[in-house]
């Protein structure tokens, strides 16, 4: 058996605009998905996810006639989760040139599903890492990221950037612009996350921005403005000492840019009342800035605050189901057991 884990992520800035070639800065955070993979004698795949939904689930597929689970009939999180695992298995089979390898796969995760914290990317990255190792063909994190991107791209019908998968594979703060993905230096950013208990449909939200952008020049300009603020944010990060806590002036400037980013995302129609309310709770509690993270529509906001105030305020916000501090995860995918 091989066990690998990969971190989730928050977007400091740049989600959605990254799909159109603008830069984005996601940051890996210390909440992990862990995938255990056991090679089988036959070509079937059995997926068990004891804690991914309320009751957990087990699905088995493969063999003749049903080589994939029927995941198109419903858009539920469980079906989506299985689709990502199936895509990861396909990538591992391809990488190892073992098209009929079968596996028992167990997925555990402390990243809320579909909530903007990179749950699907973390599962795909950890799954590919564990399955390729199990088949005796381990990949380096960049190669895992490339395969994970292809898996997400397939599941999301082409609506995927490299940002989530690259960040979860290599860890730390990263900069993604089109095919150009790299790690960047970042100080210890005091992230606080608020989760509304819900999830957004990434494909639908990305398609909504795409049609706004095609219909209105000012929506295309809005996407371009997100790119401009990301470039500004990168410059602020580059000036901070990556080995230390950032000074208040750096947090203030990053927070201002996060607030701006949230406003532009809201204009592009990807926020929600619960996300907006959590963002305002964080700001009123004294956070340097707050914004939605990921595709939006529901799920999580991320704020910057060194004090306990934002987390406390979020806990008292009716729309907020969970609030927690999220440390920057300096490491990406890693093997836990081989
Ligand atoms: C989803 O976590 C982030 C989006 O930018 C889509 C993507 O980059 O693939 C909305």
Image (cartoon, helix red, strand yellow):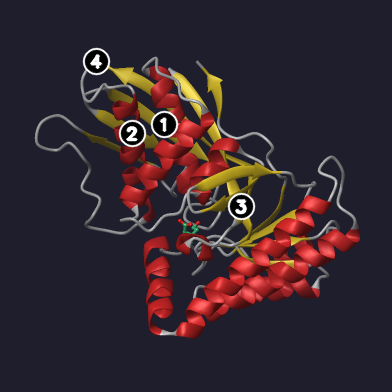
In front of the other: 315 or 118: 118
Of the numbered discs in the image, which one, if any, rests on residue 91? 2
Question: Are the residues flagged by discs 1 and 3 in contact, CB closer than 8 Å?
Answer: no
Q: Tell me the residue that label 3 is attached to.
A: 26
Q: Tell me the residue that label 4 is attached to.
A: 41
Question: Are the residues flagged by discs 1 and 2 in contact, CB closer than 8 Å?
Answer: yes
Disc nearer the start of the sequence (4/2): 4
Question: Are the residues flagged by discs 4 and 2 in contact, CB closer than 8 Å?
Answer: no
In front of the other: 228 or 303: 228
Alpha carbons under labels 3 and 4: distance apart: 39 Å
In front: label 4 or label 1: 1
Secondary element type, mark 4: loop
- Tell me the crowding category of disc 1: few under 14, some 14 to 19, or many 20 or more residues within 10 angstroms, Cα based: many
Question: Are the residues flagged by discs 2 and 3 in contact, CB closer than 8 Å?
Answer: no
Alpha carbons under labels 2 and 3: distance apart: 24 Å
Alpha carbons under labels 1 and 2: distance apart: 7 Å
Disc nearer the start of the sequence (3/4): 3
Alpha carbons under labels 4 and 1: distance apart: 19 Å
Secondary element type, mark 1: helix
Q: Tell me the residue that label 1 is attached to.
A: 128
- Tell me the crowding category of disc 3: few under 14, some 14 to 19, or many 20 or more residues within 10 angstroms, Cα based: many
In the rendered image, is residue 331 in sight?
Answer: yes
């Amino acid at each position: 058996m091989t066990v690998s884990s990969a971190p989730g992520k928050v977007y400091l800035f740049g989600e959605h605009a990254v799909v159109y070639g603008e830069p984005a800065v996601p940051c890996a955070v210390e909440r992990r998905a862990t995938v255990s993979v056991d090679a089988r004698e036959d070509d079937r795949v059995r997926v068990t996810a004891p804690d991914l939904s309320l009751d957990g689930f087990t699905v088995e597929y493969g063999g003749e006639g049903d080589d994939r689970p029927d995941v198109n009939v419903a858009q539920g999180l469980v079906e989506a989760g299985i689709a990502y695992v199936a895509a990861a298995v396909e990538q591992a089979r391809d990488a190892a040139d073992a098209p009929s390898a079968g596996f028992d796969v167990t997925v555990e995760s402390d990243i809320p599903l579909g909530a903007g914290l990179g749950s699907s990317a973390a599962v795909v990255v950890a799954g590919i890492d564990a399955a390729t190792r199990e088949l005796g063909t381990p990949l380096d994190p960049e190669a895992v990221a490339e395969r994970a991107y292809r898996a997400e791209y397939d599941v999301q019908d082409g609506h995927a950037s490299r940002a989530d998968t690259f960040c979860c594979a290599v860890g730390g703060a990263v900069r993604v612009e089109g095919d150009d993905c790299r790690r960047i230096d970042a100080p210890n950013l005091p992230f606080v996350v608020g989760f509304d208990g819900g999830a957004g449909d990434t494909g639908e939200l990305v398609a909504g921005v795409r049609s706004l952008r095609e219909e209105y020049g000012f929506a295309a300009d809005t996407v371009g403005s997100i790119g401009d603020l990301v470039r500004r944010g990168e410059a602020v990060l580059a000036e901070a000492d990556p080995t230390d806590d950032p000074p208040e002036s750096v947090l203030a400037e990053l927070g201002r840019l996060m607030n701006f980013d949230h406003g532009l995302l809201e204009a592009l129609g990807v926020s929600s009342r619960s996300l907006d309310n959590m963002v305002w709770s964080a700001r009123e509690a004294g956070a340097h800035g707050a914004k939605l993270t990921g595709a939006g529509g529901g799920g999580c906001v991320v704020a910057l605050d060194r004090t306990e105030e934002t987390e406390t305020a979020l806990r008292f916000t009716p729309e907020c189901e969970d609030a927690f501090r999220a440390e920057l995860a300096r490491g990406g995918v890693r093997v836990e057991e081989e």
